Image (cartoon, rainbow, N blue to C red):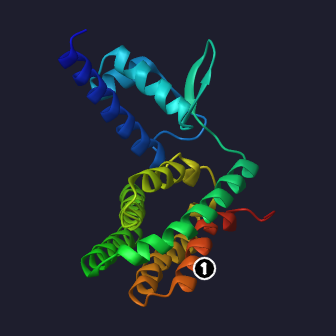
Amino acid sequence: MSTKSKLLTDQATQQLICQLKEKIGAGIYRPGEWLKQIDIERSFNVNRFTVRSAFTELSNSGFLQHVPYKGYRVIEHSIQERIAITEARELLESAVALKVMANVDSEGLEELQTLAEGFREAFENSDQKHMMERNFAFHRTFYRYANNTYLSNMIDEMRERGVGRANQGWAKPSTVAASCQDHFDMVEALRQRNITRLQSLIYQHLNRWREGYEEL
């Protein structure tokens, strides 16, 4: 394979990985659902090598589960795994919030405000697809201001593995409404340079999913 061909193949694989992550995060591919290679080839107009490469990478990064002789399915986290992931995110995101507060500027605050408003609009219109997209966009933008690509990418991957759809929490309008308000409150805490308030909001926001489970 020539260098140019390999580059194009790698680009196609990374593009497919991004597309599959988005669909997993939005709940289009649900936890436990099997992804058939031929269906992905047709849906995304890619070859089987690209699909296999994307599946392997998504399996290695925790988005898919590989079952020998059966194929790949969207990973389905247990409640215990979700708790462990949430605890890891609490520690990481609370620490990174210090860097976000130090770096965010007035333009960034306005951008975050606009994204929060976009999420609220999607919620009010019961537009689940755009709710998920705008939620991801808000948090990606928020942690972009850490000015550390490695940290922000790590946080993004932990958020977008599909765990947000593997629970009953977002099925409750009251939980979504509270999550919506969290976004606005986080922006206001940044404006006020109130790190204690911001870290408290991050903890609260990360644990909203527990409201869907009476046993928790």
Q: Mark 1 sits on what residue?
A: 200
Measured as percent of width and height from the top left, residue 140 is found at: 39, 60
Hey, which residue is sitting farthest left in the picture?
A: 4
Camera-side residue of 82 and 32: 82
Indicate whether 102 appears above or below 43. Answer: below
Across the whole image, how many numbered discs are drawn on residues? 1
Indicate whether 45 appears above or below 146. Answer: above
Dot 1, crowdedness within 10 Å: few (<14), some or many (≥20)? few
Asked which secondary structure carries label 1, the reply is: helix
Measured as percent of width and height from the top left, residue 46 is found at: 29, 21
Left or right: residue 33 versus residue 116 is: right
Q: Point out the image quarter for the N terminus.
A: top left
Tell me which residue sits at (53%, 36%) in the image. Answer: 61
Q: Point out the image quarter for the C terminus.
A: bottom right
Q: Quadrant of residue 211?
A: bottom right
Measured as percent of width and height from the top left, residue 79 is found at: 73, 51
Indicate whether 197 appears above or below 16. Answer: below
Measured as percent of width and height from the top left, residue 96 is found at: 50, 67
Hey, which residue is sitting farthest right in the picture?
A: 215
Tell me which residue sits at (56%, 54%) in the image. Answer: 164
Q: Amino acid at mark 1?
A: Ser
Camera-side residue of 195 and 16: 195
Tell me which residue sits at (49%, 71%) in the image. Answer: 97
